[in-house]
Image: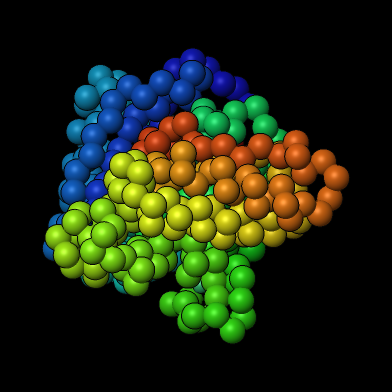
Amino acid sequence: MSVSKSRLAVGVDIGGTNMSAIVLRVADGAILARKTIETRAAKGPDDGIRRLIELIEHVVADADVRWQAIEGIGVGCSGPLDLERGLIQNPFTLPTWDDLPIVDHLKSAFNKPTLLLNDAQAAALGEHQLGAGRGTRDMVYITVSTGIGGGLILNGQLYRGYQFMAGEIGHHSLNFEGPACYCGRRGCWEMYASGTAVAKIAQARTTPESQLWRLAHGQPEAITARMIGQAAQNGDPLSLAIFRELGMLLGVGISNLINIVAPEIFVLSGGVMQSHAFILPSIIETVWQQKYAAGTEHIRIVTGQLGLNAGVIGAAYAVMRFIDELL
Ligand SMILES: [Zn+2]
């Protein structure tokens, strides 16, 4: 593989709320330009594709580089996706974009190698290349937000699995008789340990004495994971207890993953993990209590370092690896 200093790639991240794009210089991971716009999926796929193409043109112009120097475009997107055919199939957060052939659209607009991968896989690759997982061989990336997503780096490579389906760790079941999940299974990890799950617990348990009650203006059904984070910061006992329980439930799933994958590091990210100070200690305590194999104490459990940039950085690296036939 020849890595010249001038290698450049575009990385794109598409979520239900925002779309971001960067121009990445591969050799040192420098972001030469970055821009974020609203997704506005409800306006339909034609509008979305047109604005996405403009976003990419804009960011390349901002980076002040020649188009010819851009080797490829990597796109991380919230799933489900048909990664073999390059289609978005996400009626949950990208309604109206169903079956959108995003890879074909971008290829015909820019005539560059283009790769689609799911957003958690992209973020895993980003944290492994430039963030908390730098220099490690086996890493599990976990994003805890509305749901739980994940990505596996095994033997230094993004492990994508049969039909690129690997890493759906939020849908490993903790209880086969548990609550029904939208994926069709029961008792999935994200039914217990996601931002949505903790918000529901807080909605059920809050009392007028809790800070959550005030933050939600007396409407418990309006409580969000972000409010629990705010209240925990102010020492609210209910919120602190809910985060301790969340840490325990995350720890149970992480212990399962240790037994299956045995990575050297877990990198935790996502909106809920912004409150890591209140969650991480009980994760580590639970993993420690449930350790099965010797050596578990050497496994590191840390938070991500790249924040919102993990996905765009990983998408840019992914398309370069794809071009180099390493992915
Ligand atoms: Zn599920």
The count of marks equals: 0
Q: Quadrant of the C terminus?
A: top right
Q: How is the image coloured?
A: rainbow
Place residue 220 in its image quadrant.
bottom left
Residue at the bottom extreme of this rendering = 177
Residue 99 % position (x, y):
34, 69
Residue 167 shows in the view: no
- Residue 132, horizontal then vertical, whole percent: 55, 31
x 67%, y 32%: residue: 136
Instruction: Decide which of 19, 205 is in the foreground and name it.
Output: 205
The residue located at (25%, 49%) in the rendering is 18
Figure quadrant of the N terminus = top right
Residue placed at 56% from the left, 60% from the top? 249
- Which residue is painted at 47% across and 77% down in the image? 181
Q: Nearer the viewer, residue 286 or 114?
A: 286
Is residue 309 visible to us here?
yes
Furthest residue in direction right, as rendered: 294
In this image, 281 relative to 46: left or right?
right
Q: Is residue 170 above or below residue 25?
A: below
Q: Which residue is situated farthest in the top direction here? A: 5
Where does residue 27 sit, x and y in percent of width and height? Answer: 51, 19
Q: Nearer the viewer, residue 60 or 313?
A: 313
Instruction: Where is residue 26? Give x, y as percent.
Output: 48, 24
Q: Quadrant of residue 133?
A: top right
Question: Is residue 41 left or right of 167 when viewed as pictured?
Answer: left
Q: Nearer the viewer, residue 159 or 139?
A: 139
